[in-house]
Every structure is written in C-alpha cells, then in structure tokens.
Image: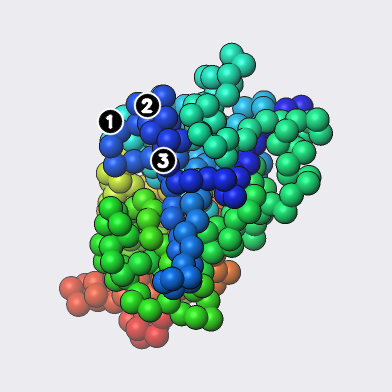
Amino acid sequence: MTRLGFLIDQDTCIGCHACTVACKAEHEVPLGVNRTWLKYIETGTFPNATRQFSVMRCNHCEDAPCVEICPTSALFHRNNGIVDFDTSACIGCKSCMNACPYDALYIDPDSLTAQKCNFCAHRVDVGLEPSCVIVCPTHSIWTGDLDDPASAISRMVARHDVAVRAPEQSTRPKVFYKGADQASLDPTRTAIAPDGMIWADTTPGHPTPPVPDPEHQVARTAYTTAHPAPWGWRVSTYLVTKAVGAGALLIAALLVLLGHAGEQSAVGVMPPVVGGAFTALTGVLLVADLKQPGRFHYIVTRPHWGSWLTRGAAVLAAFAALTAAWFVAGLVDAAGAIEVLAAPTALLAAATAGYTAYLFAQCEGRDLWQSPLLLPMLLAQAVTAGAAVLALADAVMSVPEPDALRWT
C-alpha cells in the first residue's frame, strides 16, 4: 500500500514563495486564498535575530477530521493516502474548516466550495511530482511513499529529527518538518508582530499583543496568511433557536408527566407551535449558512453517516415530524395520543438540543469547543429556554404548573 507524504526541509528553505506561486498557477487558485502558503517567524532581538520560513498546507492526515465531519463525503482518502476533495459534492457547510487543526481548507470564492492542497493528485496519477516540488530552487520540499523504506523521504524521516504540527490532535499528519523551530509549528508559542506582519493584515477584532509572553511566546510571527472564522452569527443564533424549539417540547413532556395532557391550548397546541416554528427557523439558518444552499439536499441524497452534521439533520427531521404529530393530536384534543407521544418526543428533543456537542467534538481545529461539559450545558440551555417561553405564555393563557416553570 502506498502512503504518500511531504517533508519540508527548513534548514534549506529560503522563503521565496515559489511553491505558493506554482500552486496557484497549477490549480488556478484565486487571489486571497492559498492551498500552500509561507509563514515567517522571528526569534531573538537585533542584532542577534533570526528568521525561519515554514511551508504550510494540508497535512493529508491518516485520521483526517475533515473527512470524518464532511456530511456528503466531498472529502475522501485516495488509495495512496492523499486527502482529496470532490467539488461537485461540496455544500459549503465549512465544517471541514473547523475540523482541520492546520487551517488548511478555504472556501474558493469562485466555486463557493471547500478546497485545499490535494497533493497535485492529477500529476501524481501520471507519475509526476507536485508542482511545488518541481519549482523549489533549494529542493526543500520532498515527497514520496512513507511505506517504502527505500524512498528518499522515508530515509530522511528515519535519519533526521523531524517534527509534525499539532501531534496532540492524533490526526497522524503526513507532512514532516526537518530542522524546524517548534515556535514555527506551534502558533501558541508566537506573538503577532505589532508592525502589521509585513504585507499581511492582522485579523480584524483580534488586537496584536505588543510584548510576547516570555514564558510561552518565544518568537513572533512576522508574516502569514489570514484565516477568518468559518462560522458566524447564523451558527450562534442556531444554537439559541434550536434550544427554544427543543426546550418547548421538553417542558411540554414534563407537563404531560405531571398529568396535564388534557390541557388543549397550553399543552396540546402552544408548545408544538413554538417548537415547530423555532425548529423551522433553525433549518433556515443552517441552509442559509451554506455557501451552496441549493445543494442542501445532498445531506439526504448522498449522506456520510459518520458526520454529526448528517446525523443532526436526521435528528432535526425526526423531531420536526413528532412535533407535527403532537400538534395534530392537540388540535383534535387527543390527550391519549399526546401521552403516547410525550416520551419519544422528549427523547428526540434532548437529541436535538444536544447533538451539537458531538458535532463540535468533531471540530478538532477548535480546542475551546472540546469540553465534556458541552452536552449538559446544551441540555440545560434547552430546558431553561423552554421553561422561559412557556412561562412567558402564562401571561396570555393559563399554563399549568407556573411555579414549576419558574423553578425550572
């Protein structure tokens, strides 16, 4: 079996950007985004200062988080280990961008789909090396089969002290760095240069620290590329609307448990109306956040069930169906049917509120989302939101157990 990988020799890299330019030319990469880019870090102070150049790109991980989280299998492993992508299958959900610990993916402004380095797979297929390897004037980029002990890259990995980026993520990356200062591979060990990073703008909203922390930041990043946050206000709002929609039915199920299934307006009709409306709004926000909203049906027609985006869509659809059934039962004042629906609806409401914890757990590139407390937080948020909405409704109709709602 072939397992292709890269080795970047930072002892010889001169930071000329030839690899970046060749990659752009080979793949017609638009301005403003990069499959391969250079990062400069500086250590020391004048006159004893040094600069290192690091080639950054997709790491073609063996356990690639982007492949796991992609809801339509637009990202996939080739037989030779390359992580490639199918533009025609991408819905532009940007989940892969949050899953990647290496910021290797971007949304192409022309196709509005996720793209990245694909090892120049079209060249490899016909026996050629990637374009970045061909143009490098100092042969600082090596490629080959890591499973072939006779290959040049295997010999270099075996003979030299090499490092990889973010090994703690356990993605088993296949881009190795020879002679790299750890500060160039670990962004938490560098401060952003206060003079504007040469030709690059600093990320808006993130002020540059004027003085590095000597205990943790041993260098400064003088030049790199911008990587904007993939998800914005729509995803933040979806967390709220989903909590309200699920919470309304969770509290309604509690009221049924307390013996109020016969309250037609307050239990049979109002909760599913609120839950259905906010669940529908959740779906609208999710589809609107896609770069290719016209392809949203791919989650159903070509699903990848390993992705919690796909599983979450199924949970939302099932919850919406039970919410509609509850509403119909409430309209015809079928208290018995509501009692039967209460338990499965509550279960799916909890799943609707909580599945995002598992989705965020797949976002390996976002360490602050990797909390075991996220699931109980989301469930508590939903219960609180549902009780709040029904407590507000008590102002215009008679809602049973108002004290229990306020307590909740």
Asked which quadrant contains residue 87, the reply is: top left
Asked which quadrant contains residue 371, the reply is: bottom right
Residues 218 and 265: in front is 218
Q: Earlier in the sequence, mark 2 or mark 1?
A: 2
Q: Check disc 2 and give the amino acid type.
A: Ala
**Residue hosting label 3:** 17
What percent of the width, then of the height, locates residue 350? 49, 61
Residue in the picture at 35% in, 83% down: 406
What percent of the width, then of the height, locates residue 403? 36, 85
What percent of the width, then of the height, locates residue 339? 48, 59
Q: Check disc 1 and give the amino acid type.
A: Asp
Disc 2 is placed on an element classified as helix
Residues 140 and 244: in front is 140
User: Image check: 137 left or right of 394?
Assistant: right
Disc 1 is placed on an element classified as loop
Q: Nearer the viewer, mark 2 or mark 1?
A: 2
**Residue hosting label 1:** 110
Q: Where's the C terminus, which quadrant? A: bottom left
Taking 121 as reference, is 339 above or below it?
below
C-alpha span from label 3 to label 1: 23 Å
Residue 31 visible in the displayed image:
yes
Taking 179 as reference, is 24 above or below it?
above
